[in-house]
Image (spheres, rainbow, N blue to C red):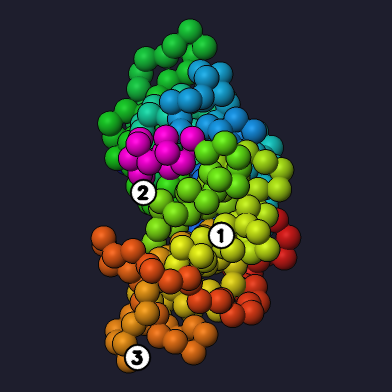
Amino acid sequence: MAPENLFDQDQREQDDEINGILQEWHEADPDNSRGAAVFRRTFDQLYDGQHTGRYKWAQLSKTERTHFGTLIEINLRREFSDIILDGEAMDFQIEGIDIDCKYSQTDGGWMIPPEAYDFEHLLLVSTADDTAGAWSLGVVRASSGNLRTSRNRDAKTGLNRVGRQNIRWISRHAALPPNILLRISESDVSKIFSGRSGQARVNSLLRTVTNRRIGRNTIATVAQQDDYMKRVRGNGGARTILAEEGIIVLGGDYEEYRRIAEELGAVVPEPGEFVSLPLVPASPGSPHTTILDGTAWRIARDGEVPDSPAPSLPSVRRAPSAASTSRTER
């Protein structure tokens, strides 16, 4: 009976460690927005779209794909420095507990080294799929009951069926911030990239992809210029050019622009994102309208083409973002 009692006590202590880490993580990222941003940033970092024009996993080399695990470890450590310290025996330390960071392109394909399972350390396991627009992150212990009995030539092993079931998920198949170039047709992508200049390509993107969240990195990928943000703004950028076609461009960094999107019943851009909207005059008091330049406006319906320039947008101030409020410095 004594060994069983000791085993039960050990299991309770292990559960307490996992529970403590999950609680700490939830308090640091209650809506998983920081975690989602890390995975989005890591994909974009590998694509390096500003310099390469790449925007999807299939365009990466095998070596680059393998590097994702290293980058996600670095980026998680950097983003969550408020709760993650450098580990003593493993990659990280959270709540004073060593935890090994493991990423796999294949869900469940994590390879676990002897230094993790010899001492039954905790594992922070993750996977992500940009095409599916989803990411997962969880905690599990590298205990004998959770692992396969087989080993590869490096003495590494993987989780067995029980181990995969025992993962305590921080996030499971949660949505990534959108990579809009993966969500539109190949013909639209080809049309956008056919522009001869960065400005022409950004104009085409914002003209073609309306009422959809477009991230800053997508702008950089399409423009492929150092001053890519200039291609969106007024004073000769897309905001000025598309206004002549009845299209406004709203940025999520500004409270007033987010309010306008909400009033129009449009997709609301998050900080660092843009939404372009074709507008037509509306009857005052109609649903989903906003007042600009003293006139009521609504989003053009499918097949409806604006026949007048878009109204001027009001002066704006930058909206506080989750990134700026979650900690002082990133």
Vertical relation: 186 (above or below) 10 = above
Amino acid type of the residue that numbered disc 3 sits on in the rendered structure: Pro
Q: Which percent across, then down, holds residue 198?
A: 61, 42
**Where does the magenta region start and end?**
181-194
Q: Nearer the viewer, residue 48 or 237?
A: 237
**Residue at the image point whose x is 63% and y is 69% from the top:** 325
| Residue reaching furthest to the top | 153
Residue of label 2 = 172
Q: Is residue 163 left or right of residue 67?
A: left
Question: Which residue is disc 1 drawn over?
Answer: 241
Amino acid at pointer 2: Arg
Q: Position of residue 123 (x, y in %)?
A: 49, 38
Tag 3, which secondary structure?
Answer: loop
Instruction: Report, in whole angstroms, how far the alpha carbon at label 1 lies from the one at label 3.
Output: 27 Å
Q: From this viewpoint, which residue is outermost toward the front?
A: 307
Q: CA distance from mark 3 to mark 2?
A: 44 Å
Residue drawn where x is 59% and y is 63% of the image: 240
Q: Is 186 part of what is drawn in magenta?
A: yes
**Place of residue 108 in the rendered image (x, y in percent of width and height, measured from the top left):** 36, 31
